[in-house]
Image: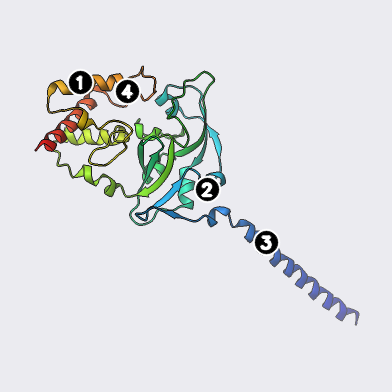
Amino acid sequence: MKVYIKLISLRLTKKIILFFSMASFMFLSCLSISPLNKLPVKLDDNENVLVISRDPVFSLLEKKWISSTYFDRGLNYESSLLEVVSLSDLLKVYSPYGNADAILLNCADDYQGIISLNDVKKYDLQIALKIQLLQGAVRPDWLQPMLIVVPNHAKPPFFERFLTANITELRFISLAEYYAPLNSLGLENANAQFGLDLFKSNCLFCHSINKVGGNKGVSLLSSFDLTFRSEKKRFKDRFLEEHGSDNDTKQNMGQFIDNNQFEALLEFLHQISVNKGK
């Protein structure tokens, strides 16, 4: 009888242990369901994934403070600190679909940046939610979060596109579709094509062409008749005046383009000015 009772007791003990083990597993499984997995995906009118600056995802993603020599170099600062989240982590929550291979960055001041998903992964791009400058540093009005940040371990080319600030929304789009009106311009030589590439990486964000790009700056084709040599000189003088190293806005575009590249940029603008007049 004692042996029988012991066997029953042992079986009950095993069942109790099994019950609590299963209950614990189910409880932990519920805990592991992250709030990130419950966020609804928002779409724009063209069915592109849309993420706004107030999206709850930015309060749920892991944050960290980092420095960025790329940021400091681009804006002539020292020892700046930025609270960032990883764009790669954002892509795990809001996965692009279809032919989307880039993120369009719409900004509060009609600036419009764009970065490819390949650049996000290749250069581990971050997005800053807070910007902390050294005391006494001059901060232009447009330098507001959200801001694209290059971490110190990444070495992308030195372009304006990797310093996009004041971002209010991110849209996942197709690069080919976005650039289609520019890629169909029918440029006649390699130098003009090189100029187009430079324009895409440094100028298009403020100065739209063929309804592509931002409208923070004036229309270059309307402001300058670059079919004339005198207008080319006026354009270069105005560029150095507005975007040189001593401007108050800290938009020093001259640091991204050397003299030879500037000539290629002029060749591109000249060709589309000529084509526009035909």
Closer to the chain start, of discs 4 and 3, is 3
In the rendered structure, which disc, 3 or 2, sits on the residue that comes first in sequence? 3
Query: Is residue 58 found left or right of 191 in the rendered image?
Result: right
Residue 135: image quadrant is top right
For the C terminus, the quadrant is: top left
Of residue 66 and residue 130, the one placed in the foreground of this image is 130
Q: Nearer the viewer, residue 138 or 2?
A: 138
Whole-Å distance between the Cαs marked 4 and 2? 35 Å
Mark 4 secondary-structure assignment: helix
Residue that badge 3 annotates: 27
Q: Report crowding for label 3: few under 14, some 14 to 19, many 20 or more residues within 10 A (C-alpha).
A: few
What amino acid type should be assigned to the residue bearing mark 1? Arg
At which x and y percent is residue 190? Answer: 16, 35
Tag 2 secondary structure = helix
Mark positioned earlier in the residue sequence (2 or 1): 2
Q: CA distance from mark 1 to mark 4?
A: 14 Å
